[in-house]
Image (cartoon, helix red, strand yellow):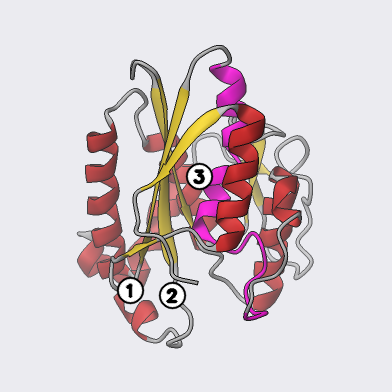
């Protein structure tokens, strides 16, 4: 059964099979908040590029982030990573078609890839993240997790329209891996390439001013050069 025909029924099976190896009950050090505020199931999975060495799975999309983290091969070219990302985004759009069609017009879920490369391009690693897509109470928990993984997300002010909180964007999920990657490749020049797509249309989305604030701060601290492949937003 392909992703395009599996729809919602295929996604939970994909998550269960992919995470059955290495999944644990969410206890430290795998996540700081082992008990969900809403009483739902929470799992923790080891993730060495997160500051605390673990990642909390609270939704379908946080599970997909963990799955992709274990599946994406290292040391590919930027072109190879982008080709894989575009193919996966296309399949995901088909699988979640009914859900995306029913999203309100002002809500545009995103998928983002962050590619870290050393110079002269011998080492590379990619991370794929998603906007926070969940019920309000679960959404709050996921954003709390993201801020604990990357406290810099607490610095930017709220969005100008007062709607989106820092940490909501797909890019924010990928940024949490940057410090560990910079430390791992200390002494090497590092290039960071990012691309986010609107899951409804697969059109590129430039950094919001919150994400731009965080990536600039991290680039100064961790000494890397960054490039957003999407056209800049007009604010």
* Nearest to N terminus: mark 3 or mark 2: 3
For residue 36, which quarter of the picture? bottom right
Q: Nearer the viewer, mark 3 or mark 2?
A: 2
Q: Is residue 48 magenta?
A: no
Kindly check if marks 3 and 1 are in contact, taking CB atoms under 8 A apart as contact.
Answer: no
Image coordinates of residue 116 in percent, x first then y, are 44, 31
Residue ID for mark 1: 200
Q: Is residue 166 magenta?
A: yes
Q: Is residue 234 visible?
A: yes
Residue ID for mark 2: 108
Q: Secondary structure at mark 2?
A: loop
Q: Residue at x 79, y 66 (%)?
A: 37
Q: Does 133 sit left or right of 194 as displayed?
A: right
Image coordinates of residue 60 in percent, x first then y, are 50, 61
Q: Residues within 10 Å of mark 2 (few under 14, many from 20)?
A: some
Outermost residue to the top? 187
Residue ID for mark 3: 66
Q: Residue at x 52, y 29 (%)?
A: 224
Q: In 3D space, how far apart are the residues under numbered discs 3 and 1 (Cα atoms)?
A: 22 Å
Q: Is residue 46 visible?
A: no
For residue 177, which quarter of the picture? top right
Q: Quadrant of the N terminus?
A: bottom left
Q: Does 215 sit left or right of 9 as displayed?
A: right
Q: Secondary structure at mark 3?
A: helix
Q: Residue at x 70, y 70 (%)?
A: 158
Kindly check if marks 2 and 1 are in contact, taking CB atoms under 8 A apart as contact.
Answer: yes
Image coordinates of residue 51 in percent, x first then y, are 69, 34
Q: Nearer the viewer, residue 191 or 35?
A: 191
* Nearest to N terminus: mark 3 or mark 1: 3
Q: Which residues are magenta?
A: 161-185
């Amino acid at each position: 059964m392909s992703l395009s025909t599996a729809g919602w029924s295929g996604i939970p099976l994909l998550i269960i099979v992919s995470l059955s190896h290495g999944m644990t009950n969410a206890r430290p050090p795998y996540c700081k908040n082992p008990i969900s505020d809403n009483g739902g199931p929470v799992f923790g999975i080891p993730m060495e590029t997160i500051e605390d060495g673990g990642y909390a799975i609270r939704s379908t999309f946080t599970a997909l982030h963990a799955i992709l983290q274990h599946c994406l091969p290292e040391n590919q070219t930027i072109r190879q990573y982008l080709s894989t990302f575009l193919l996966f985004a296309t399949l995901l759009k088909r699988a979640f078609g009914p859900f995306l069609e029913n999203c309100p017009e002002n809500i545009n879920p995103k998928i983002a890839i962050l590619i870290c490369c050393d110079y002269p391009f011998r080492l590379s690693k990619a991370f794929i993240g998603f906007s926070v897509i969940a019920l309000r109470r679960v959404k709050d928990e996921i954003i709390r997790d993201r801020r604990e993984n990357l406290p810099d997300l607490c610095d930017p002010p709220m969005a100008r329209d007062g709607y989106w909180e820092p940490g909501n964007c797909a890019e924010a999920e990928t940024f949490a891996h940057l410090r560990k990657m910079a430390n791992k490749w200390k002494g090497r020049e590092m290039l960071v390439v990012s691309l986010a797509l609107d899951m409804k249309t697969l059109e590129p989305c430039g950094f919001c001013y919150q994400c731009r604030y965080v990536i600039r701060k991290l680039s100064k601290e961790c000494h890397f050069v960054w490039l957003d492949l999407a056209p800049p937003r007009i604010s």
